[in-house]
Amino acid sequence: MRILIDEKGYSWDQAWNMTRKIFYYTNHTLMSEALETWPVEMLGRILPRHLGIIFEINEWFLNEVREKFPGEEDLVQRVSLIDEHGDRRVRMA
């Protein structure tokens, strides 16, 4: 996303559509205990632009989840890219 937007000049929607098509499939485990997380604070310090893009993706994604599953805030918290429990962490999967 960062390269497509910042270096190649694509709009957010164009870059997001390409990114979704490229990374649509995952072959890694979906078990929550096996998924890597990074502290939001650390990621923001080291890669602030990337963290901003992660937050934008998360906002878009959670809005889509809310549209499909109204009133299911527990689901929204579970699927968010940001784990808000305790120290905020980015779910990297």
Image (cartoon, rainbow, N blue to C red):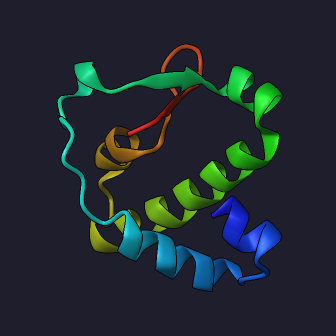
Residue 89: x and y, percent? 54, 25
Which picture quadrant has residue 59? bottom right
Residue 55: x and y, percent? 64, 50
Quick one: 60 or 54, which is closer to the camera? 54
Residue 82 position (above or below residue 62)? above
Which picture quadrant has residue 28? top left
Q: Quadrant of the N terminus?
A: bottom right
Which picture quadrant has residue 34? top left
Q: Is residue 10 left or right of residue 74?
A: right
Residue 35: x and y, percent? 32, 27
Which residue occupies 78% across, 28% down? 46
Residue 69 position (above or below residue 45)? below
Can residue 83 be seen?
A: no
Residue 60: x and y, percent? 53, 66
Residue 81 position (above or below residue 33)? below
Quick one: 30 or 55, which is closer to the camera? 30
Which residue occupies 29% across, 54% down? 72
